[in-house]
Amino acid sequence: MGTTALVLPLADPAADLETVGGKGASLAKLAAAGLPVPDGFHLTTHAYRRFTADLDAELRDGDEDAIAAAFDRRDLPEDIADALRAALPAGPVAVRSSATAEDLPDLSFAGQHDTFLNVSGEEVLTAVKRCWASLWTTRAVAYRARHGITDVAIAVVVQEMVPADAAGVLFTANPVTGARTETVVNAAPGLGEALVGGTVTPDEYVVTVDGAVRRSGGSLLSDARVRELAALGARIQDLYGVPVDVEWAVAGGRIAVLQARPITALAEVWNDTLRGDYLWTCANLREAVPSVMTPATWSFARVLAQPPIGGHPTSGNIGGRFYLNLSAALAVGQALGLARGGFMQRTVELYFGRIPAGVRVPPLPMSRLAVLRAAVGAALPFLRQNREFRAKIDVLLASAPARADRLKAAFRAASTPADLLALWRSDVHDVLHVDAEVFDAGARNGSMSSVKLRRRLVKLVGEDDTTALLTGAHGAAGELESLGPVLGLARLQRGEITREAYARQYGHRFADEFEVSAPRPAEDPEWPPADDVGVDPEELLARQAAVRDAAWERLRAAHPGKVARLRREVDKLAALARERERARSEFARTFAVLRDFLVRAGEVTGHGDALFFLPIEETLRVLDGDETPLASVPARRAAYDRYRALPPYPTVIRGRFDPEAWAADPNRRLDVFDASAAPPGDDVSGFPGAAGVVEGVARVIHDVADGAALEPGEVLVTTVTNIGWTPLFPRAAAVVTDVGAPLSHAAIVARELGIPAVVGCGNATTRIKTGDRVRVDGGRGAVTVLTAP
C-alpha cells in the first residue's frame, strides 16, 4: 500500500486502487483531470483494515446478518472517527462504497456494494460501517466467488450531495448494439437512483457522431443538454482510453459527474437494425459486396455512405453485410416531391426490386420540412462535388491504374510504421476519397434518364423489347468493363494478349473485390487459369446483338418517326453504363491498393492480418505507436467468424433483425424479414437488455424473498429487479422485467453474465404465467409464449 493515511482529498495523487478502491480511484482520476466531480474525500482501505483486524472469525463464518450486526455494534476507533468529522463539509453528503475489485476494466461489480445519500453529521459514521459491511453481503460474496476474487478490501468515498433536478447514466458506446459511434443517455427526474436500480423506465436519448439526437419518449432533457452530456462522455472516454459508462446529475443547470467506469460487457454486435424501425435492402449491393465485411472493409465502405438524415442512418451494417436504408431514401424522395406519379416507386424498383407485398415502409419520425432541411443541407456540398467529378471523370479514370502502381511501389519501399502513416496522410487518404467520388459520380450518371427512358419504351414496345433495346452497352463504341475479364481470358487463350497484360488489367476483379482481407487474383502466381472458357463470349454477344437489332426493326416499323431520337438516347445511356462499369472497376482497384496498404502495415508492425479487424482509424493509431485497439481484435474476429457461418440474410429487412435467430428458424424466408409482422398475440416486447436467444420454462416471481422457487435454467419473469436479485441471475436462463431500461442493473448484470434479458416490457408478469414455455430474444427485445403449461 502506498500510504497508511486514513483520509485523503478526492484528487490526491496517492488515491490509487489499493488505497481508495475502484470507484475512489476513478473519481480521483476524474477530479484530477478537471472534470466536474462533487468535492469530497476518501476514507482509505487502511481504515477498513484497522476496523476489521480482529473480526476474522465473523468474516470467515460468512453470515451476512451476523457480520452486519458485528459492524453495527462496534464503534469506530477514535482516530478514524475524528478524521471523518474533521473532513466532513457542512451540508449533507453521499457516502459510497469503493472496493478494491470494483469498477475495473474487466469487472464492474455494478451495484454489489452500498451507497447512502443525504447523510449528515454523526449519521456518516454509521453509513461508513454499513458500506464496509456491504463487502460481505451474500450477493457480493457470490459475485467474487464466480470471478475467483479472494483478496479484497473496501474504502469509502464521501462527497458533497448534489440536489439533482435530473440524473442518469450515459454509455459512450451503445450497450445493446455495441456501436462505438453512438452515445446512449438515460435520464430520470431527481437523484437517478431509481433509474440505476431499474425501478423506473427512463427517457432514452441516442446521440450519433454527427451530433444528431434520437429520442425514445420523454422530454426531460433538451437536445442541447443531451449533446453536452455526450461531449462530457467523450472527454471521459478519452481519459480512460476505452468506452465508459458515466453516472451524472444536473443541478441548477450544471452537470456533475458522480461515477465513471469502463464498460465491462460491451457486445461485439454488428447490427444497425437495432438503431430504429427502418426498411433495409441489400438488393443491387450484394453483387458488389456478397460476403460479410471485416471491420477494415466496413470503415472504407463508409466513405460511400450519404450523411444521416436527422440522425437516421442512410446505410448500415447488418451482421457484417452492407444494407441501404430505404426509409431514409424514400423520406427524402417524398420531401422533394418525387413520389408523385409513381416516379420514386419506379426508381426503387429499378435499382432494388419490388418491395414485397404486405411490407410497409416505416416512415422516419420527422416532419417533411425537417427531412427537407436535413437532406438539402447534406446534399448541396455533395452535388457540387459530384458535378466537379463528373466533369473530369475521364481523366481521373484514365490515370487510376498508374496511380495505383505508384502507391503500391511506395508501400513496398516503406520500412517503418511511421513511413506508412506518412503515406496515408500524404496520399492514400486523398486517393480513397477522390476515387470514391469518381465511383459515385459514375454510378449516378444517367440514373434519372434511365428510369424515364425505360418507362417511355415500355409504353411503346413492351417489357421484352425494352430490355433488348437497352442491352447495347458493349459494342463497337466500347467494351463493357464487367465483361472484360471473360473477354480478355478468351483473347489470352487465342494468344492475342500476354498473361502479364491480362493480370494488370483484370487482376483486381473477382467476386469479393471490395473485401480488403481477401487476396486479389493477381496475387496467385498460377492465375489466370489456362482452362478453356467454354462458349466463346463473342458468340453470345453476337447473338444478343441480333436480338437487339430485331427489336429496333420492330420499333422502326411501329414508330418510324421516333427511332432516331430514341437511338441517340439509348446510345447515350449505353455510354454512361460503360462509364459506370469502368468507375466500378477502378474503385475495385482502389480497394486492392487499400489491401496492399494493410498487408504492408501488418508486416512492418508484426501484427499481420489482425489489422483487418480494425477500422482504418484504429490501424492509424497502431502505426502511430498506440497498440490499445489491438485488444478488440479477438472479439471482432470471433464476431466475423460467427456472422460468416450464417447464410446470406434476407434481401429486405424491416425492423429489428437477429441474424442468428433468423438462421436458426426452419421457416425463415430468404426474400424478406418483417419484425412488425412477427409477434403473435401472446408476445411481449420491451427494451433489448442483453443479447441472445433462449427457450425455457417461465417462472414468475414478484418478491425476491421467493427467489428459491427459481429452478436452474428457468426464465425469470418479474416486475423489477435491483441489486438484491443478483444472486438469482446465474440460475436463470434469461431475465424478463416489466420495468427497466437497457442501462439498468438488470440489463448490465445480465450482459456481464451472458444471460439474455428483455427489460421494461410493461406487461410481462400479466401476459406470462409460471410454466409457460417462452422464447426470449434479448437482441430484439421480444418474448414469445410458445406453449402454456
Image (cartoon, rainbow, N blue to C red):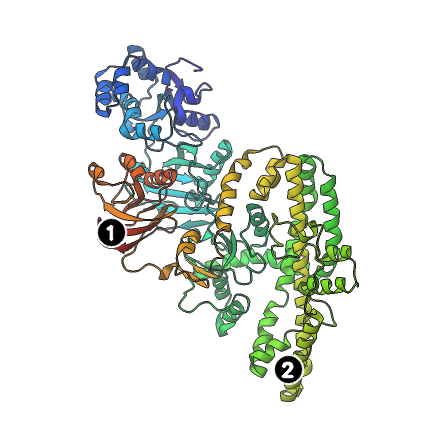
Rendered location of residue 726, percent (x, y): 30, 35
The picture quadrant where one finds residue 71 is top left
Which kind of residue does numbered mark 2 sit on? Ala
The residue under the point 74% across, 71% down is 477
Instruction: Say which residue label 1 marks.
Output: 772
Callout 2: helix, strand or loop? helix
The residue under the point 33% across, 20% down is 88
The picture quadrant where one finds residue 169 is top left
Viewer-side residue, 322 vs 10:
322
Viewer can see residue 301: yes
Callout 1: helix, strand or loop? loop
Instruction: Say which residue label 2 marks.
Output: 551
Q: Is residue 455 left or right of residue 151?
A: right
Rendered location of residue 150, percent (x, y): 36, 23
Viewer-side residue, 498 vs 562:
498
Q: Is residue 456 left or right of residue 705?
A: right
Which kind of residue does numbered mark 1 sit on? Asp
Rendered location of residue 649, percent (x, y): 47, 57
* On-image quarter of the N terminus: top left
- Pair 1/2: label in front: 1
